[in-house]
Image (cartoon, grey):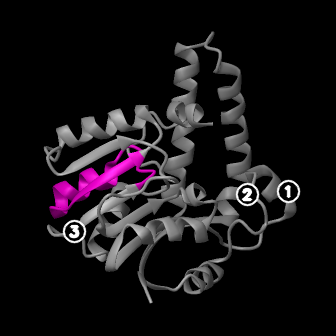
Amino acid sequence: MLRHHEIAEAGHRILNPFTEEKLLLLGQVSRIGSGTRILDLACGKGEMLCRWAAEYGSSGHGVDLSEVFLAAARERAAELDVAGRVTFERGDAGSYRAPERYEAVACLGATWIGGGLAGTIGLMRDALVPGGLLLIGEPYWIEEPPQEAYEAFGFSPGDFASLHGTLERFEAAGLELVEMVLADPDSWDRYVASQWWTIREWLKANPDDPEAPAMRDFAARSRSSYLAYNRRYLGWGVFALRPA
């Protein structure tokens, strides 16, 4: 539920298991520069667009369903003095049709917008200039998990693949993998574990909120699934791809 993530990730700038260093590294290895226009589908708080505009001189547009996240994105753009180069709009990234094409199109950790990886690649390619770059953030299995892990995550066995299997899915879609930056256990910890503190503080401040019971359950399930399965079995990375 979107509201649960708005609460749990209130203290986050980057809404995936990346540190600031990894986000900047991704911009470097993707050769982001002053001539790079980026479309970010399901952009969250827009940290990628804002930081890359400030660090590398790029520009871009972000689309997301959450007005809470978009408000944070606009504040961040003003803070970094890049509001003239990055814009944001509220909308369903899965049905968004860009009025122009971009040198890079990103979807970091939200390939559900197109019903899965293949469908999302199709959406992204529609907005890409010929020879442009796709940036896809996607989970992968570090090793084959037990059946109870799928149940804990709410995934089906075919939702994600091994790292090599993910490569095969990209190649089947006509893409060439040209770079990647992967999360590690420490960056996973900062993304997931820090949410538990945020939720606890929110519950202290809002004990009678109608969402309070659901948020307690959200935190409990997160702790259990993360420590039992996520840290061992589930990887995540951003893959830089070009049409083959």
Vertically, is 14 above or below 244? Answer: above
Badge 2 element: helix
* Direction from residue 197 to residue 242 in the image, left or right: left
Label 1, on which residue? 148
Label 3, on which residue? 36
Residue at (76, 51) in percent of width and height: 154
The residue type indicated by label 1 comes to Glu
Which of the two discs, 2 and 3, labels the residue nearer the N terminus?
A: 3
Badge 3 element: loop
Compare residues 189 and 53 and report the one nearer the observer. 53
Compare residues 42 and 52 and report the one nearer the observer. 42
Magenta stretch: residue 102 in it? Answer: no
Is residue 135 visible in this depiction of the protein? Answer: no
The quadrant of the rendering that contains the N terminus is top right
Give the crowd class for mark 1: few <14, some 14-19, many >=20 residues within 10 Å. Answer: few
The residue type indicated by label 3 comes to Thr
The residue type indicated by label 2 comes to Tyr
Extreme residue in the right direction: 147
Number of the front mark, 2 or 1: 1
Query: From which residue to which does the magenta span run?
Result: 41-63
